[in-house]
Image (spheres, rainbow, N blue to C red):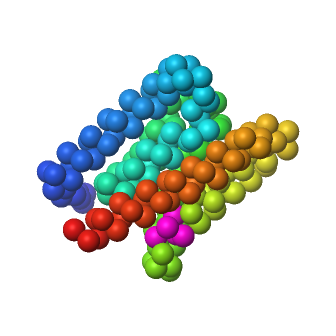
């Protein structure tokens, strides 16, 4: 039997643990935050936000870990999203990471790679919603305000990632 050892630098491990703890707490408290500020926080996609923060400040491996565990954690802790939707969101977040790293090797513009990765993963997500649910579900999920907020968050997430990526490369 083969065993594999993954060496993680203590500083990288600490960063990952901090990001993961903040991500889990943020997802856990999202319903409370939404209630307190009277804004549907799900529109800013808290799980994607946490995954992109992980991509910007942690490792690819940790980002995948969050992409695959945050939806499950949310489902277990808050019973939202529903099980099948949780699986689709998990796939969407994983695809977002995959597409970003794949595109970033082909395009030299990190901002455009992230925008493209987010949009591509969203298109695939809504295609899965359409296939497994219905057109009515997709229409309900994608009203005008929601799409506007999605456009703004996509640009902001990508800009943040671009700035933090440049800073990391320059250090």
- Say which quadrant the C terminus sits in: bottom left
Q: Is residue 95 visible?
A: no
Left or right side of 72 for 122: right
Q: Position of residue 157 (x, y in %)?
A: 50, 54
Q: Is residue 53 visible?
A: yes
Left or right side of 72 for 7: left
Count of all numbered marks drawn on residues in the image: 0
Left or right side of 85 for 32: left
Q: Nearer the viewer, residue 50 or 37?
A: 37
Residue that sits furthest to the left in the current view: 10
Q: Residue at x 60, y 28 (%)?
A: 39
Q: Residue at x 56, y 19 (%)?
A: 35
Q: Nearer the viewer, residue 93 or 165?
A: 165
Magenta residues, dominant SS class = helix
- Say which quadrant the N terminus sits in: bottom left
Q: Quadrant of residue 40?
A: top right
Rendered position, 102 above or below 54: below
Q: Quadrant of residue 169?
A: bottom left
What are the residue bounds of the magenta stretch? 110-114
Residue 111 among those drawn in magenta: yes
Q: Residue at x 56, y 57 (%)?
A: 155
Rendered position, 36 above or below 40: above
Q: Position of residue 93 (x, y in %)?
A: 53, 51
Residue 139 among those drawn in magenta: no
Left or right side of 57 for 162: right
Q: Position of residue 111 (x, y in %)?
A: 49, 67
Q: Residue at x 69, y 47 (%)?
A: 148
Q: Position of residue 156 (x, y in %)?
A: 52, 54
């Amino acid at each position: 039997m083969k065993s594999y050892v993954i060496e993680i630098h203590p500083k990288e491990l600490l960063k990952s643990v901090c990001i993961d703890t903040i991500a889990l707490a943020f997802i856990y408290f999202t319903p409370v935050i939404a209630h307190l500020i009277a804004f549907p926080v799900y529109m800013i996609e808290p799980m994607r936000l946490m995954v992109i923060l992980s991509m910007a400040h942690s490792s690819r491996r940790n980002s995948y870990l969050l992409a695959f565990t945050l939806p499950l954690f949310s489902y277990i802790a808050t019973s939202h999203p529903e099980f099948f939707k949780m699986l689709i969101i998990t796939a969407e977040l994983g695809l977002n990471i995959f597409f970003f790293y794949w595109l970033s090797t082909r395009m030299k513009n990190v901002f455009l790679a992230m925008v493209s990765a987010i949009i591509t993963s969203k298109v695939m997500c809504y295609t899965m919603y359409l296939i497994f649910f219905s057109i009515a579900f997709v229409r309900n999920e994608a009203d005008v305000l929601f799409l506007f907020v999605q456009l703004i968050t996509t640009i902001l997430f990508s800009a943040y990632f671009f700035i933090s990526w440049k800073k990391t490369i320059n250090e």
